[in-house]
Amino acid sequence: MAGIRNAYGPYAFIFWNDDLTDDGIRTQVREFAAAGFRGITPSARLGLSREIGYLSEEYLRLVRVCVDECAAAGLHVMLYDEASYPSGSANGAVVASDPQFAAHCLYRLSTDVTVTAQVPGRATDQDFWHPPLGRSPDAAILAAVATPLLDAGPDLAGARLLDVETPGLVPLTDLPPGTWRLHAIAAGPSGGTIRGAHGDQDDGSALAPPAADLLNPDAVATFLTLTHGAYARALEGHLGETVVAMFTDEPDLLGRGPRPGAAPYTSGLEHEAAERAGIDVDEVLAMLPGLWDGGDDQPIRSLWEETVRARLHRVYYGAQAAWCAEHGIALTGHAAAGDDLGTTALLDWPGQDTVWRWVLPGETALTGPESTAAKVAASAARNRAAPTAVAEVLGAYGWQLTMDEAKWLLDWYLSRGVATLVLHAFFDSVRGNRAFESEPDLGKHHPWWPQFPALVRYLARMADLLTETPPRAPVAVLSEEAHAPDVPAAALLERQVDFHYVSTDQLASGEIRDGRLHLGDQRYAVVVDARVGKDLAEIPGGSDHNLARVPLGPGWLEDVLEHLHATGAWPLRVQPAAPGLRVARVGTRWLLVNEGEEAIRTTVHLEVPDGAGSPWQWWFPFEEVHRPAHAESAGTAMAVELVLERRQSAVLSPAGEGPDQGGDAVGGWLGLPTGSRIVPVAGWRGTPSRALDGLALPGAEPIPDGVDWLTVPGLRRFSGTVEYRTDLELDADPGEVVLDLGEVGETATVIVNGTEAGVLGWAPYRIRIRAGLLRAGTNRLQVLVSNAAAVYYEGAPMRSGLLGPVRLHCP
């Protein structure tokens, strides 16, 4: 059995979406191990053959085959607790075991009536109202409410709770004269579903599995028995060893596609709401029309949301966490909302997701509820001192996703402190229409697969950095549990100040000592109160006035920066300003990531009282190379020149600290050497060398550089790899040089005299060729170019090939 490696870092999210074989599963596992993944997350997905089934004996046997092979290959496993998503239904088996376990909701039926006094004893033209509940045998009226109807709408403050008589009749004879809106608040199945494992179980299908009631402890217990229990029996000996976590995926209380206007419900929830508010249950029932009318400020809305959240946390997440703890594994996954700090904090490995192109370079990186997802996950991890934060990422970004975009989004997470990235997804099959289910495939069905392992190994190195010593932030942003605000996040990140979100419950569990809020593994010097409409928070035991408390208002950022500077709590600043630069402090090291679209050239100023005179170094984790830092020191102050290319990250550390310095791959600064001599590299000829898995290689005349191969007859939809070759004559050994490929569509592997020099996946397509690879005389250069997947899958005219111009920059 191979030694199991670090459990944190890149995981491959696998779609089991067709027929499966033992040999196919074993081969897939070995490919992921060779690519540098730390683990896998196998998932039953739309297209899984019904001959195998979900949670069947055969399915569980195949899971065992997979996990056994992972143990042999040194990979960890996160089990996925559902067929497709959202979690909690066991592909419909929970509701099949008892129809009462279906997801339930409240919905409102209403009608307007005018009560007159002309006919004593009669309220209207009828004595009763019979709300039309339809044919559902499980629907029932929870409450009937009458509200005065004014010109501006129903007067909810004047609500009157009405009687309900069998079989669902509402007497109207006691209503005073006037115009009334009658509300029947009905409880019944939501009608919501999940996306199942088989091709006929997608959204909108009559066979889509029904969602389960995640607020019902009996339904949740059944779910755990059917799924987790089955895995425990099938994987005896692996839980807590090879299997390290259970991934629960955005549980949805109503399911997908529920009846319009549905509000989450389970039997007795109104009593919990009444107890929470300290009022009689009839008062809660009379308030229920406010779930639909009267605007967001209706008190029932916040009360109902808080009651639902508390029950979900207790019933669903509490049961999941207890099961995982009993079996020695971590609970991970992500909540339904990207800015849900409270739910994320319940996970042993707090997680979030970013899919459907929600976040891209530009405005969405810093604005909107999804822009906070990475920090929500990292904050929850740090405030409970979890070993890692997790993110499901790249899913449904489409076949036009480029490696350039992928690198940016992965760095977006890493720079915010999320170390374990579950890459979505790797398709077992693209047969039929399987290629268009939450695409793209990131593996063998993608042209860039030969270059992708370089990105995976980068993620593993970054995970080691972020988990060996957890990042420390000086600022806590106090937030509502259900909503982490984006405004303070953007302002702090653009000024290179790291922070974490903190909820009021987390704040109450902290301790103030020596001018710092001690919470989890963090020591915050400033608390920014970003809650809306709340008084400035008093921190329990907060008599230490060296801890700054700053309300989010005019001048708040300047106050924070001034306090950090005065106390030395964040000894870094950059000048000139670099809004696209992200910074995290990891022990004595500093991670710097270029999140912008242009190269960053600035100076990093550090206060380092214990090491200003020591040599410092840069480590470039993608290129895996070290360079000395050009620093000037004066007393305790140090100024370091920073040149960070587009899509580049670097780590600044005292010499001798950090990763092993033995790496000799190319890298370092990719800027062109000052005063360099330019040598054109011409004569390239390209030949298709790899087509997408299962496709035949096309025949073609040699393709010269500078030619988009989509313009070559027979190659309009060719998606794969073209090998370009040329010979370069040099009069003398040039030493270390920079090879600039110019424009590339889209990824490239550079090989010099038979030795791989590195992988390029984004502009600038420049690579340092270390001394000794090029020599005097004839040199064979090869560039393996893989183009965009959308060329084949969507017919997209995305430029393909070695487009150049290719130049060598010599000292």
Image (cartoon, helix red, strand yellow):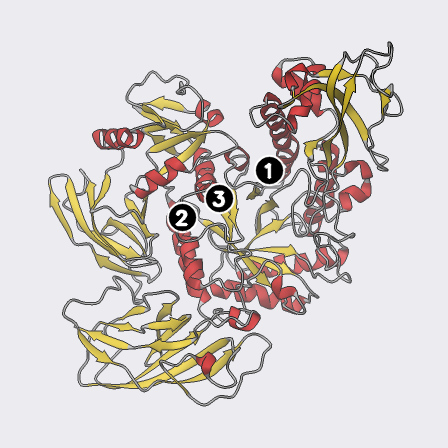
Residue 255 visible in the displayed image: yes
- Classify 10 Å Cα crowding around label 1: few (below 14), some (14-19), many (20 and above): some
Question: Label 1 vs label 2: CA separation?
Answer: 40 Å
Examine the rendered structure and indicate whether residue 329 appears above or below residue 268: below
Q: Which residue is mark 3?
A: 370
- Classify 10 Å Cα crowding around label 3: few (below 14), some (14-19), many (20 and above): many
Is 222 left or right of 500, judged from the image as shown? right
Q: Which residue is mark 1?
A: 325
Examine the rendered structure and indicate whether residue 335 appears above or below residue 106: below
**Residue 406 x/y as whole percent:** 45, 58
**Residue 58 x/y as whole percent:** 75, 59
User: Is label 3 in a helix, a strand or a loop?
Assistant: helix
Is 653 left or right of 329, judged from the image as shown? left
- The residue closer to the viewer here, 24 or 700, is 700
Question: Label 1 vs label 3: CA separation?
Answer: 30 Å
Examine the rendered structure and indicate whether residue 55 appears above or below residue 496: below
Q: Earlier in the sequence, mark 2 or mark 3?
A: 2
- The residue closer to the viewer here, 240 or 248, is 248
**Residue 584 x/y as whole percent:** 33, 44
User: Is label 1 in a helix, a strand or a loop?
Assistant: helix
Q: Which residue is mark 2?
A: 363
Residue 428 visible in the displayed image: no
Amino acid beneath label 3: Glu
